Amino acid sequence: MLDIQKLRENPDWFQERLKRKKFATNLDEVLELDEARRKAVTEAESARASQNGANQEMASLQKGSPEFIAKIGEMKKLSAITKSLEGAAKDADEAFRAAYMKLPNVPSDESPDGRGDADNVEIRRSGHDHDSYTTARAHFDLPGIDKLLDFERGTKVAGAGFPFYRGDLARLVRVLIGSFLDHNGQRGYSEIAAPLVVNADSARATGQLPDKEGQMYSCREEELYLIPTAEVPVTNFYRNEIIPVADLPLKHSAYTPCFRREAGSWGADVRGLNRLHQFDKVEIVRWERPEDSEAAHLELLGDAEAILQALELPYRVLEICTGDMGFPHSRQFDLEVWAAGQKRWLEVSSCSNFTDFQARRANIRFRREEGAKPEFVHTLNGSSLAIPRVLAALLENGFDGESSVRLPEFLARPFGADSLKLPV
């Protein structure tokens, strides 16, 4: 949510910056609705004050007197007027908020301009030789993979995009999750286990509503949503709270299954593990003082990047352009791994700085000192990491050409073996 006071004072500044993002915005409409809302609230408050004044006058009159009876008639009229004006004020406030909540976050001046993913900027990549993976094969074509990764039965039980992991592959997924959580813990992130459903207030706070309502699974009866990422429940952990400044920065890591409808996805992008409706992911979330969030963003990116280095996977870092950036994002980096069997890059992490956008919607604040006016924190999050595409790259790049997949030391120790045997 944008700062409405700053929006009133300098709408042209916001207009210029919001044009850089892909989301349609109408600042004039928002400001007109804001003005109408404030006028309606003032009129309702004035009517309520008149009604209260008349009440006090009535209390001083003798019951049953002509003046008392006349005042009763006046009170009925004032009550009806007040009720009508308060209803109008409520309607005006709801109209304003509906338009206001559709405004995306302002992109950082550091973010490159662009219209789509083709304009994202590669800022670095690992030094791996992509031509060295001579035995690589697409993970969905590996010998015996259907005995470890069962899409057919997943489709029977739930639908497309809900696979079963079996045997040693299921165990490797568990090792990946635990290893990521342990890595994050060593970097100062406190582990937290989060709910897998959130209410509408939580989804609005992080910007999933109204922007991504069509991509979320929901239970309409309770107005609950299956989480698309642990970012949503974990960020809302501190909703409507004032955090002691001594506690900042706050850093949490969480593993959850994630659920996304991914409506409209098709083709090569959805083969195998490339795009699922349910997938496992470890997330890191931070709450920072505003002046610290830019440095914290780079640090968070480094925390996620370090896992890819430990996994010995070829990767690159992209800075996301304004036209490809998400609704609540101010600045965004993506991490992609090279899947040698498919000969393509797969996104495995998005590391984002939301500045105070989510904190305003969630009302998460801090005080710099005792008695000081509360300020909004800055929130940041990153995938650390998404399991399916990491697993796809490990299977493809590590395939020995026959019947096993080499595992990096980072995984070999907890897995108990330096390779995954394929049941050929």
Image (tube, rainbow, N blue to C red):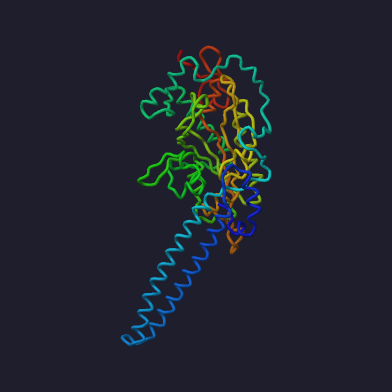
In the displayed structure, does residue 258 sit left or right of residue 396?
left
Residue at the spot 50% in from the left edge and 29% down from the top edge: 275
Q: In the image, residue 82 lies at what x, y percent?
A: 42, 70
Q: Nearer the viewer, residue 390 or 9?
A: 9
Q: In the image, residue 170 lies at what x, y percent?
A: 45, 26
Location of residue 393 with respect to 289 vertically, above or below: above
Residue 248 visible in rendering: no
In the displayed structure, does residue 258 sit left or right of residue 393?
left
- The mark tally for this picture is 0
Residue at the spot 63% in from the left edge and 47% down from the top edge: 293
Residue 6 visible in rendering: yes
Image quarter for residue 128? top right
Q: In the image, residue 195 lies at what x, y percent?
A: 43, 43
In the displayed structure, does residue 194 sit left or right of residue 116?
left
Q: Nearer the viewer, residue 107 or 367?
A: 107
Q: Nearer the viewer, residue 152 or 267?
A: 267
Location of residue 137 with respect to 63 vertically, above or below: above
- Residue sitting at the far left: 64
